[in-house]
Amino acid sequence: MDFEFTEEQKMVKEAAADFAKNTLLPRAQEFDEKEEIPKEIYQQLAELGYLGMLVPEEYGGSNLDFVSYICAMEEFAKACAALMISLSVHNSLVCDAILNFGTPEQRKKYLPALAKGEMIGAYSLTEPGSGTDAGSLRTSALPKGGYYLVNGTKAFVTNGGIADLFVVFVLTKPELKSKGISCLLVEKGAEGMSIGVNEKKMGIKGSDTRELSFADCKIPKESLLGEENNGFRIALSLLNSGRIGVGAQCVGIAQAAFEEALKYSKERVQFGQPICNFQAIAFKLADMATQIDAARLLVYRAAHLKSKGQKCGKEASMAKLFSSEIANRVVNEAVQIHGGYGYMKEYAVERYFRDARVTEIYEGTSEAQRIVISRELLKE
Ligand SMILES: Cc1cc2nc3c(=O)[nH]c(=O)nc-3n(C[C@H](O)[C@H](O)[C@H](O)COP(=O)(O)OP(=O)(O)OC[C@H]3O[C@@H](n4cnc5c(N)ncnc54)[C@H](O)[C@@H]3O)c2cc1C
């Protein structure tokens, strides 16, 4: 058993931490207030190779192993959870989808453009009527000669307003229910596709979240990703990477909140001494640090398995479940340690508190993770 990162992983972590600290952190509050991340940030990310982290060099990517990728994502989340989730969708749910399930033509067409930032990706599984029960989605894509005729509405699409390429899950054989789901690569501007307004959210406000609608939208047959009617398997397999990514997001947010709380507890004086001298506060810090470490270990274990190409569904769910619950606990305590100031927008913990909440909801709720984990346990 080896708890050391390789030299390459350490370098990736340091470089990402540098970029996050110098470029993202100073502007994270602005992104939150404006509910937008400017295009120039994506251009900078592209130049540094962060838009093709998992893409092989032959397609212009950085070809990172999955652990290195997770190291970078943790560092980005520590500075700006909103940007991190946008990157996570682009890298692990879109680039990786095309890499793993695309035809040679699809890889050649999309991967270099995604890695260079000429295209941003979005992943669209959820619908207004189907969230946790994703297999009950209703958007239809009926095969007609050389195209699919797509009709329906998708919900909560991260990157919806900035994306150029959408990985969209649709029903190609409605009578087969979840076994009749397929995955389509839909380019922005397809006739009959419309993109809703940016949703007003509690946290991760800089990330863009929209509804997508399709009205008699004709999508060419070559846009099918993977085999017809095998889309649900693709959706679930991609979510393993996404969940480890959300785990890294949780560890990043929690670490940032912990560091702010630790600093504040040394500076804030009450009863003539820094509040960290009170055991009630010191023990909170001890619990927070211990819980973050435990969450980090689960996240990196899952990332390590994924990196080696091993089965990691249960471990990804455990990492996501535990780290999201820990992140929420830690941000809550960080606000508590800040007292009334923690409730004010001038203090970063206020944003961390709001940003953490969604981690127990998206890429499968905590209840859904418990379903996945218990099913696996009962199979063993
Ligand atoms: C900010 C944000 C960004 C998102 N980005 C994306 C994206 O990019 N792409 C995408 O496809 N989706 C995205 N989602 C959707 C997200 O994955 C869903 O919101 C999530 O899966 C939950 O679905 P739902 O909201 O419909 O809740 P529901 O499924 O309606 O769940 C409501 C409650 O019931 C519980 N519940 C449901 N079924 C069960 C059960 N069998 N047993 C026990 N409890 C159950 C849930 O855990 C939850 O507590 C995003 C969501 C948000 C908030």
Image (tube, rainbow, N blue to C red):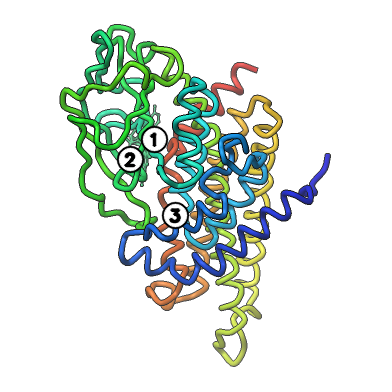
Q: CA distance from mark 1 to mark 2?
A: 7 Å
Q: Amino acid at mark 1?
A: Tyr
Tell me the tag on residue 157.
2
Label 1 with label 2: CB-CB less than 8 Å: yes
- So how many labels did they put on this image? 3
- Check the image and report above or below for 114 versus 137: below
Quadrant location of the C terminus? top right
- Check the image and report above or below for 233 versus 211: above
Ligand 1 within 8 Å, label 2 CB: yes
Q: Amino acid at mark 2?
A: Val
Q: Amino acid at mark 3?
A: Tyr
- State the residue in front, 48 or 306: 48
Label 1 or label 3, whichever comes before in sequence order:
3
Label 3 with label 2: CB-CB less than 8 Å: no
Residue 370 makes an appearance in the image = no
Residue at image point 65% right, 37% down: 302
- Using residue 236 as the reference point, say whether residue 267 is left or right of it: right
Label 1 or label 2, whichever comes before in sequence order:
1
Image coords of residue 219 (percent x, y): 27, 22
Residue depth check, mark 1 versus mark 3: number of the one nearer the observer: 3
Tell me the tag on residue 123.
1
Residue named by callout 3: 42
Image coords of residue 315 (percent x, y): 62, 33
Residue 312 makes an appearance in the image = yes
Image coords of residue 38 (percent x, y): 37, 60
Quadrant location of the N terminus? top right
Image coords of residue 261 (percent x, y): 56, 71
User: Is label 1 in a helix, a strand or a loop?
Assistant: strand
